[in-house]
Image: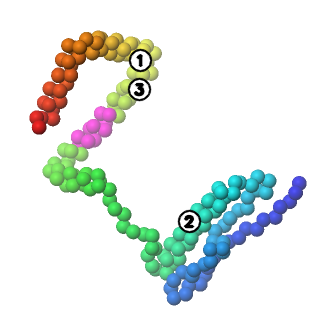
Amino acid sequence: MASTSSALTISSSSTLVDGKAPRQSPTSPQCVSLPTLPTLPPPLVQTQNRSWKTTANCRKSARNVMAMATGEAPAEVAPTEVPEFVKTIQETWDKVDDKYAVSSLALAGVVALWASVGLISAIDRLPLIPGILEVVGIGYTGWFAYKNIVFEPDRVALVRKIKETYSEIIGSS
């Protein structure tokens, strides 16, 4: 068995000049790196890309640590912008007069959803019920298609009925 020797390098800087972190040359190691296996070298492009990302992450964290040690705020820290939909939700919540009732309705909705999911999963575990419900659904779909979609006058009446219902819900514009 061939023996290979590899060096483990760790770089650290303990000096600060004028309260600022010292600049290091790009060739100096800044993080712990483990050697690759000599028998199975990884592809060249992947190794260079991965080492570049690792070095960039190490430099970023080293800058943050050094800045925190000197009492400065890291340069990358910027106030995060709140998304637009969050602002809309906050404004809508501020406009609500009875927050207790809205919260109670939301909680009741979550509980009802949880209970219905439990009921459906319990029915689904019964041996014959899911198959029977599937046959009923297929039968109703076939009946609806024959009654409302197959013939043109029925189709026109269905489209008119849908448009009327839509205009009742939305309102005339």
Disc 1 or disc 3, which is closer to the eye? 1
For marks 3 and 2, the one nearer the N-term is 2
For marks 1 and 3, the one nearer the N-term is 3
Give the number of the disc on residue 57.
2
Disc 3 or disc 2, which is closer to the eye? 2
Residue 24: % across, % down = 60, 78
**Considering only vertical position in the picture, is 24 above or below 158?**
below
Residue 102, located in which quarter of the rendered image?
A: top left
| Residue to which mark 1 is pinned | 130
For the residue pair 7 and 122, the one nearer the viewer reads as: 7
The number of discs equals: 3
Which region is colored magenta? 104-113
Give the residue at x 62% y 59%.
50
Give the residue at x 26% y 38%.
108
Residue 114: % across, % down = 35, 34
| Label 3 environment density (alpha carbons within 10 Å; few <14, some 14–19, many ≥20) | few
Element class at badge 3: helix
| Amino acid type shown at disc 1 | Pro
Left of 79 or right of it: where is 153? left
For the residue pair 21 and 112, the one nearer the viewer reads as: 21
For marks 2 and 1, the one nearer the N-term is 2
For the residue pair 13 and 23, the one nearer the viewer reads as: 23
| Amino acid type shown at disc 2 | Asn
Give the residue at x 69% y 54%.
43
**Considering only vertical position in the picture, is 33 above or below 142?**
below
| Residue to which mark 3 is pinned | 121
